[in-house]
Image (cartoon, rainbow, N blue to C red):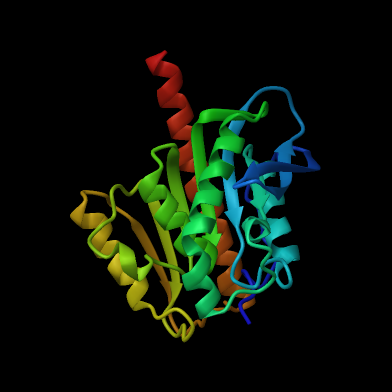
Amino acid sequence: MLIPLGSSVSTATSRPYAVEKQRESFLSGGRRISVETFAPKAPGRFPAVLVLHSSAGTLFGKRELEQLSQSLAERGMVAFMVRYFDRTGTIFAGDRGIARHLHVWEDTVIDGIGFAAAHPRVRADSIGIFGYSLGAFLGVSVASRDARVDAAAELAGGMFDYLGGRLQRVPPTLILHGTADRRVDPRYARELEREARRLGARPVVRLFPGEGHVLSPSAATSASTQAIAFLEKHLSRQSLSSSRRR
């Protein structure tokens, strides 16, 4: 079983935003896709982060994803937990199901970006993605296709095999992976790094020695903290750059 993160997420801010939560949805391929939104309880628009679950859907790890989303909102970002499995009526995906549905899920995540960009709490010029395992693969693929993605953080993922040598773009990307991962071989992290550098990108790679697909509590906390800081840095920079251009 693939369980996201595996521990609570800590924040490093001394003055976190209060957070408001709500259930929302958008249409993709004629299906209604559920979204759990975590937003700073303050006026104005903020950078957005799509949070993408693993092949376990929300059967396992939902609490950890909620904690991550809560922390993102406390740091001044709107987090959208997108239940992209709603598009295919999937609860849990094995390898065959992933091969069958991955392109549909990619399109669903792209529709989710459109939903986020049009959201009244979001700066449309500052959108990122965090994904774990299958969600990480989807995040990398969508970031390559959709120029609206300004930063990505992926844990225990990489590129789908069909993308080898075909990535179109790589935004600022944080690659997090356990060196003893038996579900997603660490070679996927190295391949993504090589492909990103081929395109002129400078990904940040953080490997966790001896860690498997589900990180230990201490490693999971470190990975989560690094992902939040990375997204905050790059999405805040994007917002500032856009403001200066105007």
Q: Position of residue 205 (x, y in %)?
A: 36, 63
Query: Would residue 229 be visible to someone looking at this image?
Result: no
Residue 195: percent from left, percent from top = 25, 60
Q: Where 233 sits versus 94, above or below? A: above
Q: Is residue 217 visible?
A: yes
Q: Is residue 168 left or right of residue 231?
A: left
Q: Residue at x 21, y 51 (%)?
A: 199
Query: Of all residues shown, which one is farthest toward the top?
Result: 246
The residue lying at 72 percent from left, 23 percent from top is: 43
- Count up the numbered dots: 0
Location of the C terminus by quadrant is: top left
Q: Quadrant of residue 8?
A: bottom right
Q: Quadrant of residue 160?
A: bottom left
The quadrant the N terminus occupies is bottom right
| Residue 222 spot, x, y in % from top left | 55, 65
| Above or below, 1 relative to 89 | below
Q: At x 47% / y 55%, what residue is drawn?
A: 139
Q: Residue furthest front?
A: 30
Vertical placement of 119 versus 233: above or below?
A: above
Please indicate whether residue 209 sits to the left or right of residue 85 in the image: left
Quarter of the image for residue 60 reads: bottom right
Please give left or right for residue 67 compared with residue 180 in the image.
Answer: right
Report x, y in % for residue 165. 22, 61
